Image: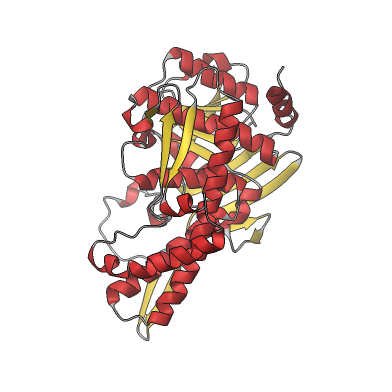
Amino acid sequence: MDNLALNLAQFIREKSGVSRLTLTDFRNYAHLRINARLAPIIITGENGTGKTNILEAISFLTPGRGMRSARLADIRRIRPALVSDEYSPTEISNLNWAVSAQVCKGDEEIEIGTAVERAAREYDDDDFRSYERRIVKINGQKITSQSELGKYISAIWLTPQMDRLFRGGSQPRRSFLDRLVYAFDVEHAKRTANFEHLYKEWYQLLKNGNAHDAWLSSLEENMAGIGVAIAAARRELIAKLNKFIEHEPDDVFPNVMLELDGTIERLLDTLPAIDVEDYYVQKLKSQRRNVLYNDNVDGVNRTDFKVYYKKKRMPAELCSTGEQKSLLISIILAQTKCQTLDKGFAPVLLLDEVVAHLDDLKREALLEKIRELGIQAWITSTDPKLFASLAEDAQFLTVKNNGVTEQAL
């Protein structure tokens, strides 16, 4: 056994993952409780039965807007009986939907709960507008920052929509990268959220044309400071993964080379962070007019995440669909191993229809790697027979009629 396997074996004994999951009014589930093993979990059922909804619920145990980036108000269960009823105004319950879980991290057990509640904000003396907000509790205590969740659980997901990750715009790739960064730097989620908030405020002030220069300058200084910290965290993660992949190449999935294509990230290659911040401030000032015309503002919110098939020296966007899926799997496997060694606990993998576009060799290789790593991976599919090699190691769940039952393969 090589050194990597020996080191990983030490952490495999320290199991991590979700041992109990409870959903309330979430998507198609009025109430659902799953007692889960810290092992591969295969969720099967017909299309449209709610398999992906379970994975989405788990994704809400981590910072952010979940694996679908859905509006909070759109997640609440729709009661079919109400569809044909004659419309009449009704009082909306304060509680919208909720997800709670018992999370294991070695010998530690943590209770995590998250819910969406409806609140009201006063706009003027006679105008109150309602909105949804997400609240999070850890061991019964309400937390002020979702980044705290990263101390206890992290998750990486692959969905069918991500099959087009390398061929679309840069925003989904940037979000995928930032989720990888969260695992190593729990403050990164807070930084990206703060930057987005500041950028929206800056953008709106410029569009409205009623902001004082001092106000704009203050926002730009804050954006530059946070933006450089975001760029630095991304660079650190890319360097870490590239080094790991170089020293620990995969035996089945293609080796990748990762790269950041962004002005701020490139400047950090040669300049101290304080100088890059000064540059960023001046850059934002010079781009104020751009916002008024085309919103083409350069910065960390335009950085692209580039992936290359190393052996072929080919950018991922030029690879076949199957190769692109294999490249994504290579990245998450490297992230999983690297995080396990670095942080002492593995991420939970959420793999929605992951075996699509994989041939038999790669499908079995992926399942074997998941089994060897001893990690919890929630995997959806319509065909349980594809996972026969995990019959002795996995937990098999069947979704039907808005409920879940455990089945033996």
Relative placement, left or right, of 290 versus 312 is left
Report whether residue 298 is seen. yes
Residue farthest toward the bottom in the current orientation of the protein: 125
Q: How many marks?
A: 0
The quarter of the picture where the C terminus appears is top right
| Nearer the observer, 379 or 236 | 236
User: Residue at the location (70% across, 19% down)?
Assistant: 2
Residue 229, image x, y percentages: 54, 57
Q: Is residue 243 left or right of residue 65?
A: right
> Which residue is located at x 59 percent, y 39 percent?
240
**Quadrant in which residue 237 is drawn:** top right
Taking the view exactly as shown, the residue that stands out farthest to the left is: 293
Q: Nearer the viewer, residue 200 or 263?
A: 263
The relative height of residue 48 versus residue 394 in the rendered view (above or below) is below
Whether residue 398 appears in this view of the structure is no
Q: Residue at x 33, y 32 (%)?
A: 317
User: Nearest the camera: 268 or 249?
Assistant: 268
Q: Which quarter of the image is occupied by the N terminus?
A: top right
Find residue 16 and report its horizontal and vertical position in percent: 67, 37
62 in relation to 206, above or below: above
Q: Is residue 22 above or below residue 35?
A: below
Residue 220 % position (x, y): 44, 70
Q: Which is nearer the eye, 336 or 158?
A: 336
Q: Residue furthest front?
A: 270
Q: In which quadrant of the rendered view does residue 381 lie?
A: top left
Q: Position of residue 199 (x, y in %)?
A: 40, 65
Compared to 210, does 6 lie above or below? above
